[in-house]
Image: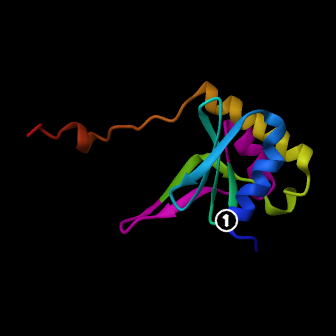
């Protein structure tokens, strides 16, 4: 398996036709931005794309899973990012088409942090 830096370079080359792409370190992987909007990330050498309902369903139909990580208390699933199936990375045209849809999804509905009820009840110090 290629190292994260090598894989990030591969993905950047793959997505270059989208336009002026920025990418850099993002948590333990890499984040990809176009026009100031993050639409993709690589975590543990897996490419995840920002997904609307239709793209998520299409990727899930191919066996892809949403991004998930564990905390000390629970597993957290980030359903707005779905993995690109590894066997589809060789199909540059398909990945690029999905990436275009991911950019649109990110532009249409930016991620926002939701305040939990517990947090909302905290009193300022």
Identify the residue at the far bottom of this view: 1
Q: Can residue 45 be seen here? A: no
As rendered, which of 1 and 102 lies closer to the eye? Answer: 1
Query: From the viewer's perspective, is residue 2 above or below residue 14?
Result: below
Q: 40 or 59, which is in the foreground?
A: 40
Range of residues picked out in magenta: 49-75
Question: Does the rendering let one see residue 35?
Answer: yes
In percent of the image, x 51 and y 35: which residue is there?
111
Q: Categorize mark 1 by other alpha carbons within 10 Å: few (<14), some (14-19), many (20+).
A: some
- Seen at 67% across and 57% down, the residue is 65
For the residue labelled by badge 1, is the local secondary structure a helix, a strand or a loop? helix
Residue 10 spot, x, y in % from top left: 79, 56
Residue 56 to residue 6: above or below: above
Place residue 113 in its image quadrant. top left
Q: Is residue 76 left or right of residue 88?
A: left
Location of mark 1 (residue)? 4
Considering only vertical position in the picture, is 71 above or below 56?
below
- Number of on-image labels: 1
Q: Locate residue 102, reporting x and y percent.
A: 71, 37
Q: Residue at x 70, y 33 (%)?
A: 103
Left or right of residue 26, residue 8 in this image = right
Q: Does the magenta stretch include residue 55?
A: yes
How was this image coloured?
rainbow
Residue in view at x 11 percent, y 37 percent: 124
Q: Quadrant of residue 25?
A: bottom right
Nearer the observer, 19 or 45? 19
Quadrant where the N terminus is found in the figure: bottom right
């Amino acid at each position: 398996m290629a190292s994260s830096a090598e894989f990030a370079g591969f993905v950047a080359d793959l997505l270059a036709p989208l336009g002026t792409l920025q990418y850099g370190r993002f948590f333990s992987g890499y984040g990809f931005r176009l026009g100031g909007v993050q639409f993709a990330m690589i975590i543990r050498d897996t490419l995840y794309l920002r997904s609307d309902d239709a793209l998520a369903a299409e990727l899930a139909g191919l066996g892809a899973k949403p991004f998930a990580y564990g905390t000390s208390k629970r597993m957290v699933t980030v359903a707005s990012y779905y993995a690109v199936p590894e066997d589809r990375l060789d199909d540059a045209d398909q990945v690029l088409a999905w990436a275009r849809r991911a950019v649109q999804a990110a532009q249409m509905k930016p991620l926002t942090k939701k305040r939990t009820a517990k947090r909302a009840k905290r009193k300022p110090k």
